[in-house]
Amino acid sequence: MKVSYFETGRYRTPDTVPGVWPMPSGVYDVDAGADVYRGMVERITLVEQLGFDWVSLSEHHYSPRILTPSPPMAAAYLAARIHKIKIALLGPIVSHANPVRLAEELAMLDTMAGGRLIVGLLRGTTNEALTYDLNPQESRERTDEGMELILKAWTEPQPFGWQGRHFKYRTVSVWPRPLQQPHPPTYALGTSREAGEFAARNRIGLGVSYGPFEVMGKATGYYREQCAAHGWEPTADQIIFRANIVLGRTDAEAQQAMEAYPARAAFAMGAGVANALLELDARNIAGEARQASVNRALPINFVGGPDTVVKQLRRCRELTGAGIVDLGFNTPGTSDPNALIAALELFGREVLPRVGDI
Amino acid sequence: MPFQEHYVEVDGFRIGYRSAGDGPPLVHLHGAGGLRVNAAHELLSQRFHVIAFEMPGFGAEENTRTRDMPELAATMVQAIQAAGLSSINLMGTSFGANVALNVAVRKPDLVHALVLEAPAAIRPAGLRPPSGQPEAIARMLYAHPERMPALPPVDPARAVRIATLTKRLRGLDREPDLEARMSGLTMPVLVVLGTRDTLIPPEMGRLYKDLIPGAHLVFVYDAGHAIAAERPEAFADVVGDFLEREDAFVISRATTVLLP
């Protein structure tokens, strides 16, 4: 199993930040923001030395949580400073993007990073529809079409036009093309039937996140079935499982930390908007309807001391087939950056050497 | 305006066609499944005088006489002229795009602009035209057969007759003579392919770009082989725009003003 470190930015402010999304940008602390980007380089330098396989970045907006609204820009910053670790964008929100522009930026990044780019293509969390005024009912279709257009823009050698439903171009011919040919390792990120079918049809990977292993196993199982129907079998490296981890030196220490884990949503919204979004944003897991994640706290999938976490990783592999786990390290109860560094070092020392054969 | 049925008698054949609309003439040559007027024809007839021919052997009567694609093209040139047309926009679908290309390379003065929809003039090795029951044919023609109206029942005798005719006429998967002549085409050419076409994969579009100087290639997203039937608005929009503005169709005229 390979391990990816999910860099979430770690914005720390001396003041209390209001809890409702969108967070007013007036409470943004410029020094705390500058620390985020300095700290990213320090942490990724560390995880590279510890032997993590990837660092991942993702896109969120209007909030101190995950301060990388433009993941390609963060990736370019990191690629210039850290030279070995693979950089995974998990991912740019395709439904927001001009897909041709995204194809260009990702090809640039892959070239500038010496072929170290991994690409996950994402529909976006429900609240994100508000960011750039997009109809949440159209986000699934926009994402599917955008993903297909990005793959086409990377691989079609002749200038072409695109007569889509949501996108229309008369001239596409991107330069540069990705350094990795035909394109960087690419994943559709999502648990839905549509994401699984898209990934299978286009022979790309699938990334799932945060749900219980058994439930995520349904999504990855559906993906594998669809791959078989298209005449191919994905490798373990083509399935990513993203999750939160609380690692302690012992199980008891981790459980104690969990008591301070905030039971609030990362992007909490007022009831009027949240309820309306829930009605408009249809989601599913391998075809089974599920409610969009609105005003719900993200679960922690891996909790414990090193031995327990190794067991949990093994179970994750068994139930989801994921060959790559993308971990967001949580240190509940403390905002001390040294606590995160300590958790990473502990993981590197006690867990990483034991995951290679999972 | 509904399509009206007409016919011309040329070259020993009675060749039917359906036409509607006013404007510059747009002649359509159908695929191996025969002529079916679809929503894209209707949309294009709002801007063009659409003339959709039924090529000899693809209707009620058998055609045992035409030997190859150049002969069929020559017959269709006569039919076009007999319909009173001297300068046309020519659009061919799949097998019909093969015919249209053969017309264009032999009678370039007749063809003002050329549209090739899922063209089968260059084919992947071993390609077989759709056959079987309507449901099976629909799965080969459409990306989303479940969204499409059912195809008409198959008359087995007619299906065998047309399959025999198509096989006889369609030529090699790659015809060196035709491909050599394609480089001499000077009229505007548009090649349209569906991103979900499993018969003529969209990757084949680049071969036309390689062979025809200045040809335009457009992918219709989420369409199978029968692009015009499956995404008529998308197809008619790009074809109409191309025929109206030719090479300049690459310049957007869509407004982005939301609230003036």
Image: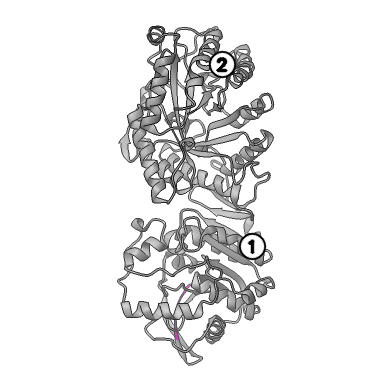
Which mark, by number, is residue B228?
none
Image disc number at residue B209: 1
Res. A11 image quadrant: top right
Q: Which element is circle 1 on?
A: helix
Q: Which residue is mark 2?
A: A26
Find residue B50 and report its horizontal and vertical position in percent: 50, 73
Give the left or right position of residue B152, taking residue A200 as reference: left
Rendered residue at 63%/40% (across/down): A107
Query: Mark 2 belongs to which amino acid?
Result: Gly
Tell me the quarter of the image containing the C terminus of chain B. top right
Kindly state the secondary structure of the residue where label 2 is placed: helix
Q: Is residue A129 left or right of residue A150?
A: left
Q: Is residue A254 above or below residue B48?
A: above
Q: Is residue A104 magenta?
A: no
For residue B192, above or below residue A144:
below
- Give the residues in magenta: B15-21
Is circle 1 on the same chain as circle 2?
no
Q: What is the spatial separation of the Cα atoms under label 1 and label 2, in whole angstroms?
A: 53 Å
- What's the magenta bit mostly, secondary-structure-wise? strand
Q: Nearer the viewer, mark 1 or mark 2?
A: 1
Q: Circle 2 marks a residue in which chain?
A: A
| Residue B16 is covered by the magenta coloring | yes
Q: Which residue is drawn at the image coordinates 43% and 86% (left, top)?
A: B63
Q: Is residue B177 above or below residue A181?
A: below
Residue B258's place in the image compared with A301, above or below, is: below
Tell me which colouring the rendered structure shows: one colour
Chain to which mark 1 belongs: B
Query: Which residue is at a point 50% across and 74% down the rendered structure image?
Result: B96
